[in-house]
Amino acid sequence: MPILDPKKIKELFPIFSKEENKNLVYLDNASTTQRPKVVIDALKNFYETYNSNIHRGIYDLSEKATKMYEDTREYTAKFINAKSSEEIIFTKNTTESINLLAYTLSDDMLQKGDRIITTSLEHHANFVPWQTMAKKKGFILSVVPVKDDYTLDMDKFEELIKEQNVKLVCISAMSNVTGTIPDIKTIIKRAHEVGALVMVDGAQSIAHEHTDVQEMDCDFFVFSSHKMFGPFGVGIVYGKKELLDKLPPFLYGGDMIKSVKETCTLFNDTPWKFEAGTPSVADVVAFKKAMEFIEELGIENIKNCEMNLAKKAVEMLETHKQVKIIKPKNLDESGPVISFVIEDIHPHDIAEVFNKENIAIRAGHHCNQPLMSHLGIPATARLSFSIYNTEEDIERVELALKKLFEIFAK
Ligand SMILES: Cc1ncc(COP(=O)(O)O)c(C=O)c1O
């Protein structure tokens, strides 16, 4: 497997060549990645050359814009190996994608007393919508806990899946805190055996792992463009066509209708019935360039390169006995996300000292307060890697850590 040259790749991202960012070490990729020039150029090109609204203009410019928008839908379907582009819905982010499913599934497919299983590894985006719907509609929400080694407690999952009326499992393919990759295939297989649907939150996995929704056999898969080198403002819902056809619309208004009379409305077909109002056309069009960019580099090459760095970062952190790493020991069970804590130093102080050294990391609860409560900590500091990170970045992190220890020794 060829190893990518991160220094050459870094040159493809304009942000790193700006004078004010010359020394920037960017390690907050789990939050949002940087954008390569091809994506930024595609955005500019759309506004300069094709800008018009889609689906309704009977003129060339609008028809071209519509084609570019629908081409991205087609490309997205191929990117995750969906059966057809009709299984792809554009939203504005993963959070909206999950809300779309939470509202429409709760309206139509779930009944009072039905059980939804989620896990304590979930981002609030994949927890709060289900918790809220459970309260509103009388569903029972069960939470699979994480074990002391930061992997999912599969024995507990097995216990919960055997309960009566399990109808839905909502699980992340990679944790944004610990990097944990659960055994999704087994979870989906077991869920289907008891007749439950599975929604996979791919917000973290999409930029690091090969995604094949047919092979995975999930019923729904959601992710965000901005975590995979694409523009902000684009979320994706993949759903099996026969399921999407059964769901009611999420939002109502223009573009999601076929015809309206004073007394009733005929909704559009899947997937357009889920896309009310003017979408983020330019962002969706430029998102195609982000997927092409990933495919040109090769997802396996990307993964190799990032995991190589993550391994080196873990080895470096392990040499500092004050540091406690919050991540599965077996790196094959996790992605390039490393949370850590240091006794008597708040993660916000770690991030502030790192910031003074021009290193951008994330510190906080990472929108996962149930996990923080479970671990008995208020927050973690988190390093998350992408393809433009280098071994020098890890050296810079180590120097920053030494500075931190000096400051707090005083
Ligand atoms: C696992 C996971 N799910 C969902 C989200 C929400 O994504 P977005 O902010 O793009 O809606 C995030 C964001 O960090 C995430 O890490």
Image (cartoon, rainbow, N blue to C red):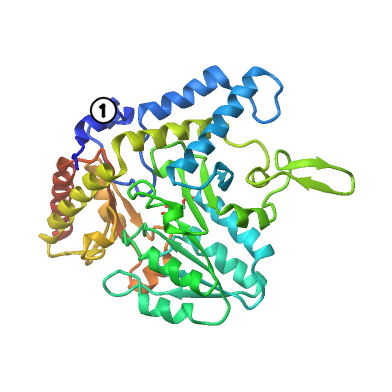
- Residue 36 image position (x, y, % from top left): 35, 31
Who is closer to the viewer here, 65 or 9?
Answer: 65
At horizontal 66% and vertical 70% (from top left) the residue drawn is 136
Q: Is the N terminus in the top left, top right, bottom left or bottom right quadrant?
A: top left
Few, some or many C-alpha atoms within 10 Å of disc 1 (few <14, some 14-19, many ≥20)? some
Q: Name the side, left or right, on which 85 lies relative to 257.
A: left
Q: Name the side, left or right, on which 317 lies relative to 144.
A: left
Which residue is farthest left? 319
At horizontal 46% and vertical 59% (from top left) the residue drawn is 217
- Per the image, the residue denoted by label 1 is 11
Q: Is residue 5 above or below residue 241?
A: above
- Residue 135 image position (x, y, % from top left): 62, 72
- Residue 408 image position (x, y, % from top left): 18, 58
Q: Secondary structure at mark 1?
A: loop
Q: Name the side, left or right, on which 156 lies relative to 273.
A: left
Who is closer to the viewer here, 167 or 359?
Answer: 167
Q: State the image quarter where residue 158 is shown.
A: bottom left
Number of numbered markers: 1
Q: Is mark 1 within 8 Å of ligand 1?
A: no
Mark 1 is on which residue type?
Answer: Glu
Who is closer to the viewer here, 158 or 91?
Answer: 158
Q: Is the C terminus in the top left, top right, bottom left or bottom right quadrant?
A: bottom left
Q: State the image quarter where residue 119 is shown.
A: bottom left
- Residue 87 image position (x, y, % from top left): 56, 47
Q: Is residue 56 above or below residue 251?
A: above
Who is closer to the viewer here, 10 or 56?
Answer: 56
